[in-house]
Image (tube, rainbow, N blue to C red):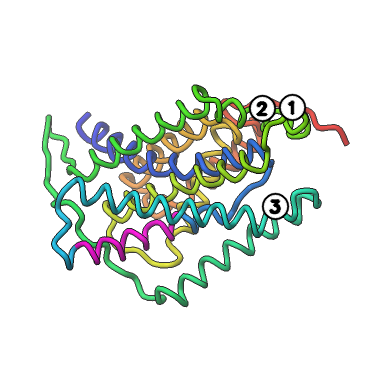
Amino acid sequence: MQTLLQNLLNGIAAGSIYALIALGYTMVYGILKLINFAHGDVFMIGAFVGYYAGGYATRHGATGSPLGAAVIMLSAMLICALLGYLNERIAYRPLRNAPRIASLITAIGVSFLLEYGGQFVFGPDPKFFPTLIEKHIITFGGIVTTNYQLIVLGVAIAFMGLLQYIVYGTKFGRAMRAVSFNFETASLMGIPTDRVISTTFMLGACLAGVAGILVGLSYPKIDPLMGVMPGLKAFVAAVLGGIGNVPGAVVGGLVIGVIESFVGGSQFSNYRDAIAFVILIVILLFRPSGLFGKYEPEKV
């Protein structure tokens, strides 16, 4: 029972990070029907912003407090939001009326640009994330965790709750859902669709930046290709939950994280990274719309 609870806790912590990244995929797809494969690399940029901002703060004695960590996270969110805006404005908006395959190929190209541009700018060697907050081991009921895991859970839940409020409880959220439902009709009704789409990219990028800081905090080795595997797993999480469905992305991320944790603690630990893609194949075979998605016939 103790091992079960330990794996469950570890899985929820990892799944919370997948969920934050998956939300960016699902929001963009919900509005543009575009799979933004560069999103995982925005997550990588967020981690490197935290690395350099944390290094600067460490040299000036400004780390070690929650306030300093919050400022560093805010810096990552702002830079990632700007990057998300530039991606949409420069790479995707000119192709909005082009065939969907053109946008997909462009997304893959932007992903490679960020990955290998990151290697050129940051260097190909791994970097070790600075200690933003002192690490403490916490034990309760035989389950061992750290304050880092609790911070990851708390921050992830807070941001997922904030996004849920934005989407379902604000005027912008209503505009966002209207654009998602019917782009042309929303435009005719006076909704500034370009602004809504740009802001959606920025929101998703902000969450990716938060995930980058949380990963740097929990697994302190970062490199320019670190966004590839988490990005793909987050995409699987979005498909599992029903891509385009915000609560589904959260559930999908948690499910992937928990399953990975249990596989990692078993004799099949070598296949830990493969399990997400097995889940993707199964979900596409038996429920292509995902757990919470709705099947929509497409006219051809």
Q: Residue at x 18, y 41 (%)?
A: 145
The spot of residue 65 in percent (x, y) is 15, 49
Please check the rendered image and state whether residue 139 is part of the magenta-colored stretch, yes or no.
Answer: no
Residue marked by disc 2? 178
Q: Secondary structure at mark 1?
A: loop
- Tell me the amino acid under the disc marked 2: Ala
Judge by depth and name the residue closer to the eye, 93 or 119.
Answer: 93
Under circle 3, the secondary element is: helix
Q: Nearer the viewer, mark 2 or mark 1?
A: 1
For residue 108, which quarter of the picture? Answer: bottom right
Mark 2 element type: helix
Residue 189, label in figure: 1
Q: State which quarter of the image contains the N terminus.
A: top left
* 3D distance between C-alphas at marks 1 and 3: 20 Å
**Magenta part, dominant SS:** helix
- Report crowding for label 3: few under 14, some 14 to 19, many 20 or more residues within 10 A (C-alpha): some
What amino acid type should be assigned to the residue bearing mark 1?
Answer: Met
For label 3, the residue is: 93
Judged from this view, the residue extending furthest toward the right is 300
The reply to whether the C-beta atoms of the residues labelled 1 and 3 are less than 8 Å apart is no
Q: Are marks 2 and 1 in contact (CB under 8 Å)?
A: yes
- Which quarter shows the C terminus? top right
Rendering quarter of residue 19: top left
- Left or right: 225 as drawn, with respect to 47: right
Residue at point 66% right, 27% down?
178
User: x and y percent of residue 190 in the render?
Assistant: 72, 30
Point out the frontmost of discs 1 and 3: 1
Residue at 69% x, 41% y is 33
Percent of width and height locating residue 84: 54, 53
10 with respect to 227 (left or right): left
Callout 2 crowding tier (Cα within 10 Å): few <14, some 14–19, many ≥20: some
